[in-house]
Amino acid sequence: MVTTITTANATTAVTAASLALIAILTLLALLIQKEITSGLGSARATNLSRALNIAIVPLIIVFVIIVAFRLLDVLR
């Protein structure tokens, strides 16, 4: 039983780390795209730049939560 619980905890930790990495890479890609589109002067680029905020803001919140949990883990 102890082995099962340990394996499940390890699997959960790997899955959480993978999801955190995907979220951070997605945030990075969206921020790059927003920077590129904000430099263009067209109305379509401006609308796309504003629309990217819909995805960027929640990912920034997730990023802050990830950093907070990693800091708490290091400080323990």
Image: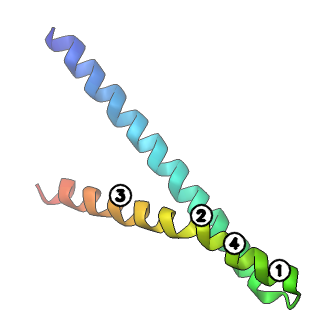
State which quadrant residue 15 falls in. Answer: top left
Q: Which class describes the residues within 10 Å of circle 1: few (<14), some (14-19), or many (20+)?
A: some
Q: Secondary structure at mark 3?
A: helix
Which residue was labeled with disc 4?
51
* Residue name at image x 47 percent, y 41 percent: 18
**Depth check, front residue: 10 or 63:** 63
Q: Which residue is mark 2?
A: 55
Foreground mark, 3 or 1?
Answer: 1
| Residue 28 position in % (x across, y down) | 60, 65
Badge 4: few (under 14), some or many (20 or more) residues near its Cα, within 10 Å? few
Residue 6, placed above or below residue 42: above
Q: Residue at x 35, y 57 (%)?
A: 66
Badge 2 density bin: few <14, some 14–19, many ≥20, Cα 10 Å: few
> Label 1 belongs to which residue?
45
Kind of residue indicated by mark 3: Ile
Q: Quadrant of residue 30?
A: bottom right
Residue positioned 86% across, 86% down in the render:
43
Counting residues from the N terminus, which is met first, the one under dot 1 or under dot 2? 1
Of residues 60 and 1, the one nearer the viewer is: 60
Amino acid identity at mark 4: Ala
Residue 66: numbered disc = 3
Which numbered mark, 2 or 3, is in the foreground of this view?
2
Discs 3, 1 touching: Cβ within 8 Å: no
Which quarter shows the C terminus?
bottom left
